Image (cartoon, grey):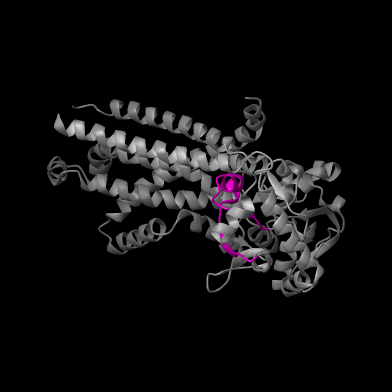
Amino acid sequence: MDYVLTLMPSMLKGWTVTLQIFFIVLIFALPLGVIMGIARLSTFKPLAWFMELYVWLFRGTPLLLQLLFWYFGLMAVGLRLEREMAVYVAFVLNYAAYLAEIFRSGIQSIDKGQYEAADVLGLNRKQTMSQIVLPQVFKRVMPPIGNEVINLVKDTALVYIIAMSELSRAARIHAVRDENLIPFAIAAVFYLLMTAIVQQFFKWLESKLDYYR
Amino acid sequence: MKRKLVLILALCLALGLFLSGCSSNADKGDKNQPPAGTDTSWQEIQDKGYFVVGLDDAFPPMGFRDEKNEIVGFDIDLAKEAAKRMGVDVKFQPISWDAKVEELDSGNIDVIWNGLTITEERQKQMLFTAPYIQDRQIIVVLPDSDIKTKADLAGKKIGIQAASSAVDAVEADKATYELIKDKLLEFDSNDLAMRDLKGGGLQAVVVDEVVGRYYISKHPNEYRVLEENFGVEDFGVGLRLGDKTFHAELEKALNAMKADGKAAEISQKWFGEDIIKK
């Protein structure tokens, strides 16, 4: 127990880094995902094609390699992002690609008849999207979004590659230095705590959004 | 109902297998610490015909993979030569450096031979051979850097390999550590730290001399090494605490290699100079 207490200061410090990445990425990636999901379905074909290429590129390569690219890759050509900035750019662009696909599938799941009905009622396309389609989309996509958010909690561990000391890195440093595996177990408890909160939040959100049933 | 029963049976079976797997591991663990006087470790190695070296296969020049994906390096050559002299074969097993003690105690590997620094902490967990190399913790900067001494490091961003003996060496130097501890960045590997230094993300890197010299030799004129360093340390081979007879045999082979110049020859090949500790 004493040993566990000696780990706490650096683990908690790592945890705040993890939380900071988590919230900042979420705040930027969610709206970006919505916009990209809509753009993916644009009737302006070049935009739709560009989005398809984007999703392929960012979903098709490991996030770890993308992190290396935004930090070390840009550095090699003389551009240098700050460490934190490289992390935010890499995570937001990567997660937006996944979220865009979820929102796209959500939008496509709305029955064509609703668009026709909105048209008959005299709503324009923008109104149809924001008043009729998107509110239903948000209800339907919550479970897969919850999946992605939980993934994000754990993916934050990848930033170790550019020397950011987040939670699992802090655990690893102790594990190696003390030749002891307990720090990993403690890190697991921290992650479980975070995902428990996310899971309960989405459970609550899904029940809140479960109107008209 | 029937299906449920089958499921429960399957689960019991799986659990049983899992538990029996665990217990056989435990048996193996006990064998590693026999009471004094009944150590059969060397006999077991001879019966097997080989010993297994555990290593991090991404640690040039001590142990790493060449273009053909074969494990090569300074420690690899030393281990092969020692095995030859002992009349047995040697196998190389990449391991996670985090779990090296567990790998050793469970019997998956017989020695850790990979630029392993001899520390007091580790001496409680492993049996070390006599040191075969002495290593310094050097400070690497860019050629045009204004950093000349350790004192100049104050307030600078400094890269270091996470959980390495370089970290211990820097922490042991209390006066300097106080100046730099807030800006110390821990990297997964030394090559990323060196790359960050070259790209301008860091102002200095503290690294094992054997590793640092290897990188610098690959990129001549791109780095400068300070006169001052963070002290010396010894590399040794780590064995299970109980493996006394195996340890004696290995020590004998290593001493012979040092005496007849074979170790020096291997050192020349990898470092361009003889840095073997006699």
**Residue A153 included in the magenta stretch of the image:** no
The residue drawn where x is 87% and y is 55% is: B149
Who's the residue at 50% across and 35% down the image?
A: A188
User: Residue at horizontal 14%, vertical 40%?
Assistant: A121
Instruction: Look at the image and tell me in which quarter the N terminus of chain B lies.
Output: top left
**For this view, does A134 lie left or right of residue B203?**
left
- In the picture, residue B134 is in which quadrant? bottom right
The single residue placed furthest to the front in the displayed view is B38
Of A146 and A168, the residue lying toward us: A168
Return the residue nearer the eye: B173 or B198: B173
Q: In this view, does A191 lie to the left or right of B55?
A: left
Residue range of the region highlighted in magenta in the rendering = B87-114
User: Residue A13: x percent and y percent?
Assistant: 63, 35
Count of picture labels: 0
- Residue B49: image location, x then y, percent: 56, 62
Q: In which quarter of the image is residue B201?
A: bottom right
Choose between B21 and B103: the one closer to the eye: B21
The percent position of residue B206, horizontal first and vertical second, equals 75, 55
Q: Where is residue B173 in the image (x, y as percent from the top left)?
A: 83, 45
